[in-house]
Image (cartoon, rainbow, N blue to C red):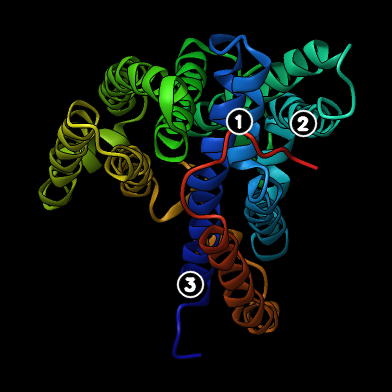
Amino acid sequence: MPFDLPTIWAAIIAFAVLAYVVLDGFDLGVGILFPLFPHRHDRDVMTNSVAPVWDGNETWLVLGGGGLMAVFPLAYATVLPALYIPIILMLLGLIFRGVAFEFRWRTQRGSGWWDHGFWIGSTIAAFMQGIALGALVQGIQVADREYAGGWWDWLTPFSIVTGVAVVVGYALLGATWLNLKTTGDLQHRARRISMLAGVGTIVLIGIVSLWSPFIDEVYFERWFGWPTAFFSAFVPTLIALCALALWHGLTTDKHLQPFLAALGLFVLSFAGLGISFYPYIVPGALTIHEAAAPESSLIFLLVGAAVLIPIILAYTGYAYWVFRGKIDPEEGYH
């Protein structure tokens, strides 16, 4: 086969995970911000802003997780036992958040409880995603091609920091999304929150970035060794440019620019992880080629992906195009 199928599939799964993070991140962020907007009308407008797209955004999570199981079964069988607890809690958070999103519209008397549920589910899902990321970065103990660690190896100071970083980062995405989609007092408050969340996100990105190279000598070599240091130096430079674009957009009453800048911070952070990880899919334990399924399976699945992914991209793009523009505060979700 003239193509490097494991690498192609690693790129497809990485794209699916990144698409999930940048798309579902802002609607999780809207839920995280609920306590800062106590009035029912504001919360209605906030949920209306994500109602047409929030469940479609989670398609990418299914694609990424299902693709990992089918294409890299050894990595799936190694990572899942190491992260059972955070993954289960994340899924429970997503389920509870989805139920609360729907039920808050069906009752007036109990809507406050469902609003709390929407906030709690969103926050737990985001925090557990960060915890899982931190646990993966710090390394998973593997022996004889299977997980050899304990039940609580995922819970460390580093993973807690990455969990907080993801929550704050999603809050930034949510706030800049509200700045883009709303008007009036709600938009003004969202812009102020974006400022604070932006500072918090940049600080936490800096802490995680400075901490990561000292977790594993492979990361240190990637970031500071030659020739990879030449490429890795671009990442913090571009992050600084995104931070500047975020600040400029928020202080000059731009609507789209801050949201794009916040997305840029996530894309660049994801690129930094790619620089640190490659060619490993389980850092320090399994490479992409070691964990890949047989070539015949990769070809078969690639044909399906070649059909499925353009369809997902098409209906996702169409949904965002149809529901572009500002939210009418007087319209409701039904």
Tag 3–tag 2 contact (CB < 8 Å): no
Can you give x and y, in whole percent of width and height, for residue 315 in the image? 62, 69
Between the C-alphas of marks 1 and 2, the distance is 13 Å
**Badge 2 density bin: few <14, some 14–19, many ≥20, Cα 10 Å:** many
Pointer 1 or 2: first along the chain:
1
Tag 3: amino acid: Ile
Can you give x and y, in whole percent of width and height, for residue 283 in the image? 47, 41
Tag 2: amino acid: Phe
Viewer-closest of 34 and 267: 34
Quadrant including the C terminus:
top right
Pointer 3 or 2: first along the chain:
3
Which residue does the image show at 29% across and 22% down from the upper left? Answer: 214
Whether residue 84 is situated above or below residue 307 in the rendered picture: above
Viewer-closest of 333 and 242: 333
Can you give x and y, in whole percent of width and height, for residue 50 in the image? 61, 41
Tag 1: amino acid: Val
Left or right, 157 with respect to 203, comes to right
Between the C-alphas of marks 3 and 1, the distance is 41 Å
Pointer 3 or 1: first along the chain:
3
Q: Which mark is residue 8?
A: 3
Residue 46 in sight here: yes
Residue matched to label 2: 101
Residue matched to label 1: 45
* SS of the residue under disc 2: helix
